[in-house]
Amino acid sequence: MKKYLILFFSLALFVGCKDKDADKKDRLYLKEIPVKGKTIEWFYYSLIGNTTADFVLLYDPVNDKNDTIIKSTNLKDVNLSGNNIILLFYGKPEKYSEPITVKSNIAGFNIKVDTTAVFTGYKRRESYLKK
């Protein structure tokens, strides 16, 4: 019985130890914008299925910290203008047909929402993996 308990706890410890960069290896990046020692990262995880959510994070490499700006399924583009992060959406921001709320600021940046993108048909998005 003692052997089984040791095996169980060893296995639980092994499963609980996750490579902190494991999810970064699976990210398919659409755009990265360096700003004030940080990076705005726009990416998604999967090509499986017809809809996958896009993530926009503000990454601080000094503290190795991510602040989530948005997780959405109808984002067209991300830009930076001065101190404003501009999110361009196909209509009102949503995630899997559910409306979402967008923060107005994050880490000293203002977040502006533009809902004027016009859908012109499905196009293959060019993405890349980080090395």
Image: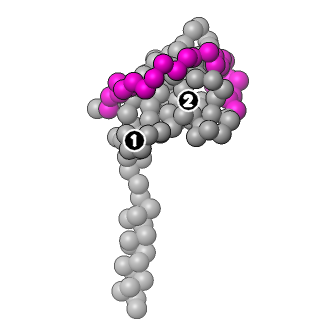
Q: Residues within 10 Å of mark 1 (few under 14, many from 20)?
A: some
Marks 2 and 1, the one that precedes in the sequence: 1
Is 27 in front, or is 61? Answer: 27
How much space separates mark 2 and mark 1, taking CA atoms?
15 Å
Within-10-Å neighbours for mark 2: few <14, some 14–19, many 20+: many
Q: Nearer the viewer, mark 2 or mark 1?
A: 2
- Label placed on residue 71: none
**Is residue 131 visible to us here?**
yes
Q: Is residue 89 above or below residue 84?
A: below
| Residue 114 located within the stretch drawn in magenta | yes
The residue where tag 1 is placed is 46
Q: Would residue 38 be visible to someone looking at this image? A: no
Q: In x, y percent, where is residue 121?
A: 45, 23
Magenta stretch in the rendered image: 101-129
Q: Quadrant of residue 45?
A: top left
Name the outermost residue toward the left.
131
Residue at x 67%, y 35% (from the top left corner)? 100
Dot 2 lies on which element? loop
Q: Position of residue 99 (x, y in %)?
A: 68, 35
Q: Looking at the magenta stretch, what is its main secondary structure?
A: loop
Residue carrying label 2: 74
State the residue lying farthest toward the front. Answer: 121
- At horizontal 38% and vertical 65% (from top left) the residue drawn is 14
Q: Name the side, left or right, on which 54 lies relative to 82.
A: left
State the quadrant of the N terminus: bottom left
Residue 113 placed where, x, y %? 65, 19
Identify which amino acid the numbered label 2 is placed on: Asn
